[in-house]
Image (cartoon, rainbow, N blue to C red):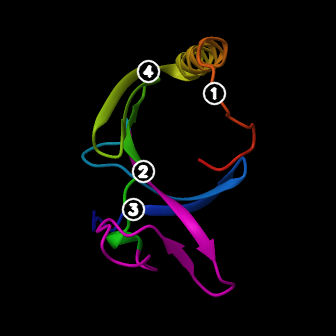
């Protein structure tokens, strides 16, 4: 992703900081994005998980593990890929809300059915 039209945003969403690269490819009807989790800020530079798990964290986002990438189209439909493995198609913010409701429901079922369930809200994953 060396396109000079790339824009990078450091977004604070909830209690996490994310390095977000967003760009257009052929036209401005689809916004593509790539998200990398910021693991640390040492007051001078951002640190990221290295994509090569055998190596230490990196300050170069190009070497970092991509948490999420995808595209949002002009009509609100979007495709999201997590860690390059799982892909989901969502239509608009309402679709994201429905997906969150599904996740919340699945966690509620796990809590009800699993005797050893010990999730603590606010705990790091």
Instruction: Please name whichever residue, 105 or 1, is drawn nearer the observer in this view of the structure.
Output: 105
Which sits earlier in the primary sequence, circle 4 or circle 1?
Answer: 4
Q: Is residue 124 left or right of residue 3?
A: right
Q: Which mark is residue 117?
A: 1
40 drawn magenta: yes
List the residue tagged with mark 4: 90
Q: Are marks 1 and 3 in contact (CB under 8 Å)?
A: no
Q: Position of residue 66 (x, y in %)?
A: 37, 55
In 3D space, how far apart are the residues under numbered discs 4 and 1 (Cα atoms)? 29 Å
Q: Position of residue 87 (x, y in %)?
A: 32, 30
In 3D space, how far apart are the residues under numbered discs 4 and 3 (Cα atoms)? 24 Å
Q: Quadrant where the N terminus lies?
A: bottom left
Instruction: Assign a secondary structure to mark 2.
Output: loop
> Magenta residues?
31-60
Which sits earlier in the primary sequence, circle 2 or circle 1?
Answer: 2
Q: Position of residue 7 (x, y in %)?
A: 46, 62
Classed neighbour count for the residue bearing mark 4: other residues with Cα under 10 Å, few (<14), some (14–19), many (≥20):
some
Residue lying farthest to the bottom in this orientation: 44
Which sits earlier in the primary sequence, circle 4 or circle 3?
Answer: 3
**Residue at point 42%, 50% (across, down):** 67
Instruction: Assign a secondary structure to mark 3.
Output: loop
In 3D space, how far apart are the residues under numbered discs 4 and 2 (Cα atoms)? 17 Å
Classed neighbour count for the residue bearing mark 3: other residues with Cα under 10 Å, few (<14), some (14–19), many (≥20):
some
Instruction: Please name whichever residue, 79 or 88, is drawn nearer the observer in this view of the structure.
Output: 88
Q: Is residue 104 left or right of residue 120?
A: left
**Residue at point 30%, 73% (across, down):** 54
């Amino acid at each position: 992703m060396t396109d000079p039209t790339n824009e990078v945003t450091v977004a604070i969403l909830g209690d996490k900081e994310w390095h977000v690269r967003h760009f257009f490819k052929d036209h401005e009807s689809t916004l593509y994005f790539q998200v990398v989790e910021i693991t640390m800020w040492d007051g001078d530079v951002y640190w990221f998980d290295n994509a090569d798990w055998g190596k230490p964290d990196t300050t170069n986002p190009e070497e970092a593990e991509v948490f999420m990438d995808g595209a949002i189209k002009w009509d609100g439909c979007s495709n999201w890929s997590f860690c390059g493995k799982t892909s989901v198609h969502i239509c608009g913010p309402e679709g994201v809300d429905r997906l969150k409701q599904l996740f919340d429901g699945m966690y509620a079922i796990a809590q009800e059915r699993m005797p050893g369930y010990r999730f603590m809200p606010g705990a790091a994953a």
